[in-house]
Image (cartoon, rainbow, N blue to C red):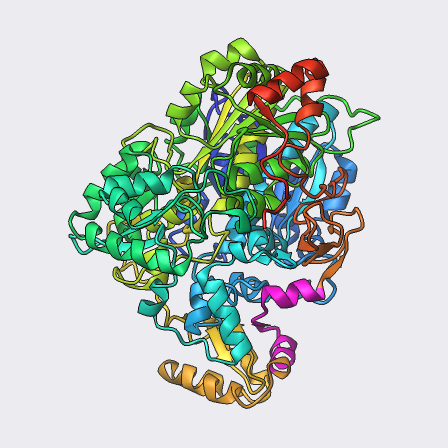
Amino acid sequence: MRNNFSNLPLNGVKIIDFGQYIAGPAVAMLLGDLGATVVHVDPPEGPMWQSPANAILNRNKVIVNLDLKSEQGLADARALIAEADIVIENFRPGKLAALGLDFAELRAQRPELITLSIPGFASNDEARREQRAFESIVAASSGVFTDMGLNRVLMGINPSFSPLPLASAYAAQIAASSTVLALQSRQLTGLGDHIEVPLAAAVMEGLCYNSIKVENMPERYLTQREVEIERRRIEGLPMNISYEDLQELLDPFFRAYMCKDGRMFYVVCPSHKYHARRCLEVLGILDELVEQGLTEEDDTYKPWSEWSSKVSLGVYPMPKDWADIIAARMKEVFMTRTSHEWKKMFGRAGIPGAPQRWLQEWIHDEYAETSGLMIDVWDPEYGDMTQPGPVVWMEESGEEALSPEPRRWAEMPEALKILRRHRTDIPDPVEDAPEGWLSGVRILDLCNVIAGPHSASYLARFGAEVIKLDPSQPLYDSWNTVMYGMSQMRGKRSILADLKSQHGRQVFEDLVKTVDVIVWNAPDSQIKRMGLNAESLRKLNPDAIFCKLDCFSGVRRGTRTDYIGYDDLVQATTGIMLRFGGAMDRPEEHAHVGTIDVMCGFGGALAVASALYQKHRFGRIGRGRTSLSANSGLLQVPFAFDYKGRGLFDEPSGPDCNGSGDLNRFYSTASGRHILLSAYEADLPRFRNVEGLEDLPDIAPEDRAAYLATAIQGQRASEWVARLRAADIAVAICDNLDALRAEHSRIADGTPGTENGSYSFSVYPDHPSGHEVTQLDPYAVRPSRTKVFAVAPPEKFGTSTRAIARELGYSDKAIDAMLASGGLSESWSDEYLPS
């Protein structure tokens, strides 16, 4: 294990990990990669999930095997916990307490202890808390499989299976970030906390952009796919569009194109002021399209009715007539070069685009290896093994994180000795602890789109004051800023400033001097130009913590470090789209929003939390880092590895996939609804107690699927759920986000929703946008000691420009002059949501 001289931010923090499967062990892995000392506890027979992925999830850990049902095993567990700062478990609510390890009792004895529970469903969800909540059960119950993107809805593939462990990956990032937030708070207060992060609530937070509902949405924001879905529903037409026809409903700047080498190239540049223009310039077709009448509006934030035409380059979505014209020419040009050539041309020109690659190719990609996004680890079971690199790291200690210790097994005396080697200095408890973990912390958010700004919004729920700074004139269209801002601007004040102007730059630098944390999602080259590299920032504010999120970064710089991009491009680069689509000529985006973007935001929060802890504990000012590409490793952890003798990369894939086997898949019922059965070979005897399925244990494996499909078709979904759960077999009806939102919504009442079980939405009839808005509550993190705040709905961009400038000491006269010069702005548009 690492020594006491490590520069990693969590050096000396001691963790006991009782987790099994993915979520719990992944939290401890994330913290272990940041320097924590981790002892992992397995049952005597070994882990409950037998997978090579355990080599990744348990790196930097010493493993002990304990029988918690025996007196000796329980005594050993208590001895380990007595040495710990953090204890992690992810069982059904109450299971560990029933074995004799009650977190409430443990914290009563040691108030400085931080305990973390990650159940499938919330402990205060009476209807679901006792269910066997495997990954796929949580996904089915939370609308993941029925809201897997607009494409699948139109193709009639609904529900649609995905093998990605979205719930566990999101829960791991949320739980890790909240645990370290509690840890940094403990350095100030001497007090620990108990935290619960249900898988269901975590994956819902990942889908918060999918589940939002805005009444009377202006027509200009509806994509061709959304219009077609609505048309078919109104006219009673089936959702049976072919994959090929579906491509013609996609925006030309948000789709894949076949290249000369038979590879698809994914373009994602639909709503930026310059990206679409640069794209057409690199392709060599801008001038001819302009001659045909393609226009650009000077101000796309004006009402649509005031535009010179209904099309403007750099605005999403494109009207269909122009979308067809542009896409036709782009198809022709992309066939003139290879995907590798286009990758370099787009990357160097600052245009978001990437070739489609399989996961196996990504694992051995030269850039992935040189940047540290994939690393080599010697594992005692699998030998030399390629694994995902660290997901979150500090610039100053990232190199150390690239050399994790392989997992190893030890006896109790050695495990205790390892823990006792470290001593954690904890201050005496304070009487008047702040309400939130981040109360009094001031954050400057310089981010755009989703990952970065979502990170800062998440931190606001724990008491941080967040100021969002955007350009005086927007670089993105209102679909991107205002629509996404409905979620990622919550709990923030907004100021608009032109950082390239003298006055705007001065206000920016004055603001930097007042904050504790700065968050920006930008490549290194842009950060240096803006003077936020380490040397420049130290001159402005030597105590400020800087956190950076971007698309392709790893610990080390490489050829693609400064390439810009979004969630979809990482899906393309790391094999997610090809797995989902099933073939090179039919890649599909995985979900509509929320596959990696929001998860990366929570990774950014973990970077901030780790930097704050390092500052409080060691007095070091660090620079936290994460990237979309790094988070893709966590999202694909069940199969993102390679070693000599590894089997085929044959995880479930393609549109015809309905599960991972006959015992874990969708089945249609007499009521027309699908259920998701999630059982294992060891569960077969339980089916003897299920009326209508008693013979399943006697059926040959190759005949099980047909037997189950026929039998299950004979009863309603609710009846099968009752019968199977009575036998303690995991099953769920495939729910959808509309139904969950309708069932679990209430008028906003100033509470964060943590008391409302596994699902919670608030309705804002008087939303600042002028529209009634229903959206997910900030409810996945449930501490027992600290407060979670119900963050306010987002104000209109620029609303707080004048107030923030006044706070910085500027007079109204000076502010008026800066507004007149364009250095500052109080608004991008007359309307909150331009119509």
Q: Is residue 5 above or below residue 597?
A: above
Q: Is residue 784 left or right of residue 557?
A: right
Q: Is residue 10 above or below residue 197?
A: above
Q: Is residue 438 left or right of residue 429?
A: left
User: To which quarter of the image does residue 87 belong?
Assistant: top right
Q: Is residue 317 left or right of residue 777?
A: left
Q: Is residue 726 magenta?
A: yes
Query: Horizontal and vertical percent for residue 683?
Result: 52, 73
Query: Horizontal and vertical percent for residue 195?
Result: 68, 44
Residue 677 visible: yes
Q: Nearer the viewer, residue 519 or 284?
A: 284
Q: Residue furthest top?
A: 539
Q: Is residue 820 magenta?
A: no
Part of the protein shown in magenta: 720-743
Q: Is residue 302 above or below residue 37?
A: below
Q: Nearer the viewer, residue 181 or 540?
A: 540
